[in-house]
Image (tube, grey):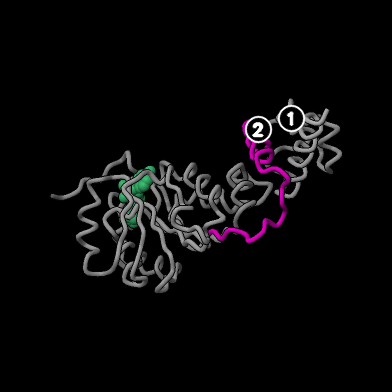
Amino acid sequence: MKHRARKRFGQNFLHDPVIVRRIIGAIDPKPGERLVEIGPGQGAITLPLLRACGTLHVIELDRDLVQPLADKARDIGQIVIHQQDALRFDFSGLGNQGGLRVVGNLPYNISTPLLFHLIDQSEYIQDMHFMLQKEVVDRLAAIPGGSDYGRLSVMIQYYCRVEPLFRVGPGAFRPAPKVESAFVRLIPHARPPVAATDIACLAMLVRQAFSQRRKTLRNSLKGLLTADEIAHTGTDPAARPETISLRQYVALADRLAANRQHAVEE
Ligand code: SAM
Protein backbone atom coordinates (compact mmCIF):
# COMPACT_ATOMS: atom_id res chain seq x y z
CA MET A 1 0.00 0.00 0.00
CA LYS A 2 1.26 3.48 -0.85
CA HIS A 3 2.48 5.41 2.19
CA ARG A 4 0.91 8.84 2.73
CA ALA A 5 3.41 11.34 4.06
CA ARG A 6 2.58 12.28 7.64
CA LYS A 7 2.92 15.89 8.62
CA ARG A 8 3.17 15.13 12.32
CA PHE A 9 6.32 13.09 11.62
CA GLY A 10 7.82 15.86 9.50
CA GLN A 11 7.76 13.61 6.46
CA ASN A 12 9.14 15.23 3.31
CA PHE A 13 10.77 12.49 1.31
CA LEU A 14 13.79 13.23 -0.86
CA HIS A 15 13.34 12.21 -4.46
CA ASP A 16 16.02 14.17 -6.34
CA PRO A 17 18.88 11.79 -7.31
CA VAL A 18 21.32 14.68 -7.79
CA ILE A 19 20.79 15.82 -4.21
CA VAL A 20 21.02 12.24 -2.93
CA ARG A 21 24.40 11.91 -4.70
CA ARG A 22 25.65 15.18 -3.21
CA ILE A 23 24.61 14.04 0.25
CA ILE A 24 26.36 10.69 -0.08
CA GLY A 25 29.44 12.44 -1.52
CA ALA A 26 29.55 14.81 1.48
CA ILE A 27 29.20 11.97 3.99
CA ASP A 28 31.71 9.80 2.08
CA PRO A 29 30.73 6.57 3.89
CA LYS A 30 33.28 3.75 4.04
CA PRO A 31 32.92 0.02 4.75
CA GLY A 32 33.25 -0.74 8.42
CA GLU A 33 32.23 2.71 9.64
CA ARG A 34 29.47 2.90 12.23
CA LEU A 35 26.74 4.93 10.64
CA VAL A 36 23.39 5.74 12.22
CA GLU A 37 20.63 7.36 10.20
CA ILE A 38 17.84 9.27 11.91
CA GLY A 39 14.51 9.11 10.06
CA PRO A 40 15.29 6.84 7.07
CA GLY A 41 11.73 7.18 5.78
CA GLN A 42 11.43 5.39 2.44
CA GLY A 43 15.17 4.91 2.18
CA ALA A 44 16.30 7.69 -0.19
CA ILE A 45 19.70 7.97 1.49
CA THR A 46 19.51 4.74 3.50
CA LEU A 47 19.99 2.43 0.53
CA PRO A 48 23.03 4.21 -0.95
CA LEU A 49 24.56 4.41 2.56
CA LEU A 50 23.97 0.71 3.05
CA ARG A 51 25.55 -0.04 -0.33
CA ALA A 52 28.66 1.87 0.72
CA CYS A 53 28.95 0.61 4.31
CA GLY A 54 27.46 -2.87 4.32
CA THR A 55 25.84 -2.31 7.73
CA LEU A 56 23.71 0.50 9.05
CA HIS A 57 21.62 1.38 12.11
CA VAL A 58 18.52 3.47 11.50
CA ILE A 59 16.05 5.09 13.92
CA GLU A 60 12.53 5.53 12.58
CA LEU A 61 9.46 6.52 14.59
CA ASP A 62 6.78 5.69 12.01
CA ARG A 63 6.15 1.97 12.34
CA ASP A 64 4.40 1.78 8.95
CA LEU A 65 7.73 2.55 7.28
CA VAL A 66 9.70 -0.19 9.01
CA GLN A 67 8.72 -3.31 7.05
CA PRO A 68 8.92 -1.71 3.58
CA LEU A 69 12.38 -0.42 4.48
CA ALA A 70 13.52 -3.82 5.75
CA ASP A 71 12.27 -5.37 2.48
CA LYS A 72 14.14 -2.86 0.32
CA ALA A 73 17.37 -3.25 2.31
CA ARG A 74 17.37 -7.04 2.50
CA ASP A 75 19.52 -7.75 -0.54
CA ILE A 76 21.83 -4.79 -0.08
CA GLY A 77 23.33 -5.16 3.39
CA GLN A 78 22.67 -5.57 7.06
CA ILE A 79 20.27 -2.97 8.41
CA VAL A 80 19.24 -2.69 12.05
CA ILE A 81 15.99 -0.77 12.38
CA HIS A 82 15.27 0.82 15.76
CA GLN A 83 11.59 1.69 15.73
CA GLN A 84 11.92 4.46 18.29
CA ASP A 85 11.79 8.16 18.93
CA ALA A 86 15.23 9.60 18.10
CA LEU A 87 14.64 12.20 20.83
CA ARG A 88 14.91 9.40 23.40
CA PHE A 89 17.50 7.28 21.65
CA ASP A 90 20.55 6.34 23.70
CA PHE A 91 23.51 6.63 21.32
CA SER A 92 25.94 5.34 23.93
CA GLY A 93 24.45 1.88 23.36
CA LEU A 94 25.78 1.91 19.78
CA GLY A 95 28.92 3.92 20.24
CA ASN A 96 30.46 2.99 23.54
CA GLN A 97 33.89 3.50 21.97
CA GLY A 98 32.91 6.72 20.19
CA GLY A 99 33.23 7.05 16.45
CA LEU A 100 29.54 7.07 15.47
CA ARG A 101 28.69 8.89 12.26
CA VAL A 102 25.13 10.21 12.57
CA VAL A 103 23.27 11.32 9.47
CA GLY A 104 19.74 12.25 8.49
CA ASN A 105 17.30 14.31 6.61
CA LEU A 106 15.76 15.34 9.90
CA PRO A 107 12.10 15.89 10.69
CA TYR A 108 12.13 19.70 10.83
CA ASN A 109 9.45 19.91 13.51
CA ILE A 110 11.80 18.41 16.12
CA SER A 111 15.20 19.45 14.77
CA THR A 112 16.18 21.84 17.59
CA PRO A 113 15.44 19.45 20.51
CA LEU A 114 17.05 16.67 18.49
CA LEU A 115 20.25 18.69 18.04
CA PHE A 116 20.35 19.36 21.80
CA HIS A 117 19.80 15.65 22.48
CA LEU A 118 22.70 14.82 20.15
CA ILE A 119 25.19 17.28 21.61
CA ASP A 120 24.46 15.82 25.03
CA GLN A 121 25.89 12.58 23.64
CA SER A 122 28.59 14.10 21.45
CA GLU A 123 31.34 12.07 23.15
CA TYR A 124 30.10 9.05 21.19
CA ILE A 125 29.91 10.86 17.88
CA GLN A 126 32.62 11.38 15.28
CA ASP A 127 30.55 13.56 12.98
CA MET A 128 27.00 14.45 11.96
CA HIS A 129 25.54 15.31 8.56
CA PHE A 130 22.05 16.71 8.50
CA MET A 131 19.49 18.18 6.16
CA LEU A 132 17.73 20.94 8.05
CA GLN A 133 15.61 23.96 7.41
CA LYS A 134 18.05 26.53 5.94
CA GLU A 135 17.14 28.99 8.67
CA VAL A 136 18.27 26.48 11.30
CA VAL A 137 21.61 25.98 9.53
CA ASP A 138 22.03 29.77 9.45
CA ARG A 139 21.45 29.82 13.20
CA LEU A 140 23.88 26.96 13.83
CA ALA A 141 26.65 28.75 11.95
CA ALA A 142 25.87 32.33 13.03
CA ILE A 143 28.51 34.58 14.52
CA PRO A 144 27.82 37.27 17.16
CA GLY A 145 26.16 40.45 15.98
CA GLY A 146 23.33 39.24 13.79
CA SER A 147 19.73 38.23 14.32
CA ASP A 148 20.49 34.54 13.55
CA TYR A 149 22.86 34.31 16.50
CA GLY A 150 21.20 32.77 19.55
CA ARG A 151 21.12 29.95 22.05
CA LEU A 152 21.38 27.29 19.34
CA SER A 153 24.50 28.96 17.84
CA VAL A 154 26.28 29.29 21.18
CA MET A 155 25.53 25.81 22.50
CA ILE A 156 26.17 23.93 19.25
CA GLN A 157 29.40 25.84 18.63
CA TYR A 158 30.51 25.01 22.16
CA TYR A 159 30.42 21.33 21.20
CA CYS A 160 30.95 21.27 17.44
CA ARG A 161 32.58 22.83 14.42
CA VAL A 162 29.77 23.81 12.05
CA GLU A 163 30.25 23.52 8.28
CA PRO A 164 27.26 24.54 6.14
CA LEU A 165 27.65 22.60 2.88
CA PHE A 166 24.91 23.37 0.34
CA ARG A 167 21.35 24.59 -0.06
CA VAL A 168 18.47 22.47 -1.29
CA GLY A 169 15.24 23.85 -2.74
CA PRO A 170 11.76 22.57 -1.78
CA GLY A 171 11.37 20.77 -5.14
CA ALA A 172 13.81 18.04 -4.08
CA PHE A 173 11.21 16.68 -1.62
CA ARG A 174 7.74 15.16 -1.79
CA PRO A 175 5.65 16.74 -0.51
CA ALA A 176 7.61 19.95 -1.03
CA PRO A 177 8.17 21.77 2.27
CA LYS A 178 7.31 25.46 2.49
CA VAL A 179 10.89 26.34 3.39
CA GLU A 180 14.39 26.19 1.90
CA SER A 181 16.66 23.47 3.24
CA ALA A 182 20.40 23.18 3.70
CA PHE A 183 22.85 20.36 4.35
CA VAL A 184 25.32 20.81 7.18
CA ARG A 185 28.26 18.96 8.74
CA LEU A 186 28.83 19.12 12.51
CA ILE A 187 32.11 17.83 13.92
CA PRO A 188 32.26 17.49 17.71
CA HIS A 189 35.44 19.07 19.09
CA ALA A 190 37.86 16.57 20.59
CA ARG A 191 38.24 19.21 23.31
CA PRO A 192 36.08 22.35 23.44
CA PRO A 193 38.06 25.41 22.24
CA VAL A 194 36.87 27.15 25.42
CA ALA A 195 35.88 24.81 28.24
CA ALA A 196 33.30 25.82 30.83
CA THR A 197 33.80 24.59 34.41
CA ASP A 198 30.13 23.65 34.62
CA ILE A 199 28.17 23.00 31.42
CA ALA A 200 24.85 23.16 33.28
CA CYS A 201 25.69 26.74 34.31
CA LEU A 202 26.58 27.63 30.72
CA ALA A 203 23.34 26.11 29.39
CA MET A 204 21.23 27.90 31.99
CA LEU A 205 22.93 31.26 31.53
CA VAL A 206 22.70 31.17 27.73
CA ARG A 207 19.06 30.13 27.90
CA GLN A 208 18.25 33.01 30.24
CA ALA A 209 20.24 35.55 28.23
CA PHE A 210 18.41 34.74 24.99
CA SER A 211 14.98 34.37 26.57
CA GLN A 212 14.89 38.18 26.56
CA ARG A 213 17.18 39.05 23.70
CA ARG A 214 16.16 42.68 23.50
CA LYS A 215 17.24 43.36 27.06
CA THR A 216 20.77 44.22 28.12
CA LEU A 217 22.75 41.49 29.89
CA ARG A 218 22.47 43.41 33.14
CA ASN A 219 18.69 42.95 32.97
CA SER A 220 18.40 39.56 31.33
CA LEU A 221 20.90 37.95 33.73
CA LYS A 222 19.26 39.42 36.85
CA GLY A 223 19.19 36.81 39.59
CA LEU A 224 22.25 35.04 38.14
CA LEU A 225 24.96 37.73 38.00
CA THR A 226 25.17 41.36 39.08
CA ALA A 227 26.28 44.11 36.69
CA ASP A 228 29.61 44.27 38.55
CA GLU A 229 30.18 40.55 38.20
CA ILE A 230 29.41 40.76 34.47
CA ALA A 231 31.85 43.65 34.09
CA HIS A 232 34.55 41.71 35.98
CA THR A 233 34.49 38.98 33.34
CA GLY A 234 35.36 41.63 30.75
CA THR A 235 31.87 41.99 29.26
CA ASP A 236 29.90 45.22 29.17
CA PRO A 237 26.69 44.75 31.26
CA ALA A 238 24.91 47.10 28.84
CA ALA A 239 25.63 44.77 25.88
CA ARG A 240 22.87 42.70 24.28
CA PRO A 241 22.94 38.90 24.27
CA GLU A 242 23.40 38.60 20.50
CA THR A 243 26.70 40.50 20.61
CA ILE A 244 28.43 38.21 23.14
CA SER A 245 30.92 35.60 21.90
CA LEU A 246 31.08 31.99 23.04
CA ARG A 247 34.27 32.81 24.94
CA GLN A 248 32.48 35.60 26.84
CA TYR A 249 29.52 33.34 27.63
CA VAL A 250 31.91 30.76 29.04
CA ALA A 251 33.58 33.45 31.20
CA LEU A 252 30.16 34.52 32.50
CA ALA A 253 29.16 30.89 33.17
CA ASP A 254 32.43 30.28 35.02
CA ARG A 255 31.70 33.25 37.24
CA LEU A 256 28.22 31.88 37.95
CA ALA A 257 29.68 28.44 38.71
CA ALA A 258 32.24 30.01 41.09
CA ASN A 259 29.46 31.92 42.92
CA ARG A 260 27.48 28.73 43.35
CA GLN A 261 30.49 26.80 44.55
CA HIS A 262 31.16 29.57 47.03
CA ALA A 263 27.55 29.48 48.26
CA VAL A 264 27.78 25.69 48.83
CA GLU A 265 30.99 26.07 50.84
CA GLU A 266 29.61 28.80 53.13
N1 SAM B 1 15.34 10.16 5.09
C1 SAM B 1 14.10 10.20 4.35
C2 SAM B 1 14.31 10.99 3.08
O1 SAM B 1 15.33 11.68 2.99
O2 SAM B 1 13.46 10.91 2.20
C3 SAM B 1 12.96 10.77 5.19
C4 SAM B 1 13.16 12.17 5.72
S1 SAM B 1 11.73 12.88 6.49
C5 SAM B 1 12.16 14.59 6.38
C6 SAM B 1 11.95 12.60 8.23
C7 SAM B 1 11.86 11.15 8.69
O3 SAM B 1 12.02 11.12 10.13
C8 SAM B 1 10.54 10.48 8.42
O4 SAM B 1 10.76 9.19 7.94
C9 SAM B 1 9.84 10.43 9.79
O5 SAM B 1 8.92 9.38 9.92
C10 SAM B 1 11.02 10.28 10.70
N2 SAM B 1 10.78 10.78 12.07
C11 SAM B 1 9.96 11.78 12.48
N3 SAM B 1 10.04 11.99 13.80
C12 SAM B 1 10.96 11.09 14.25
C13 SAM B 1 11.48 10.80 15.54
N4 SAM B 1 11.09 11.48 16.62
N5 SAM B 1 12.39 9.79 15.65
C14 SAM B 1 12.79 9.09 14.56
N6 SAM B 1 12.32 9.34 13.32
C15 SAM B 1 11.43 10.30 13.15
Look at the image and tell me whether residue 218 can be seen.
yes
* Residue 31, position as x, y percentages in the image: 39, 74
Distance between mark 1 and mark 2 Cα atoms: 9 Å
Magenta stretch bounds: 184-213
Residue occupied by mark 2: 208
Residue appearing at x 20%, y 55% in the figure:
68
Residue, far top:
223
> Is 35 left, or right, of 249 in this rendering?
left
Asked if residue 83 lies left or right of residue 26, the reply is: left
Instruction: Quickly name the residue at label 1.
Output: 224
Q: Nearer the viewer, residue 10 or 117?
A: 117
- Dot 1 falls on a residue whose secondary structure is loop
Left or right of 252 in this view: 5: left
* Residue contact at pointers 1 and 2, CB within 8 angstroms: yes
What x and y, as percent, mark residue 137? 52, 52
Res. 265 mark: none
Say which of marks 1 and 2 sits in front. 1
Q: Which residue is drawn at 84% across and 43% down?
A: 234
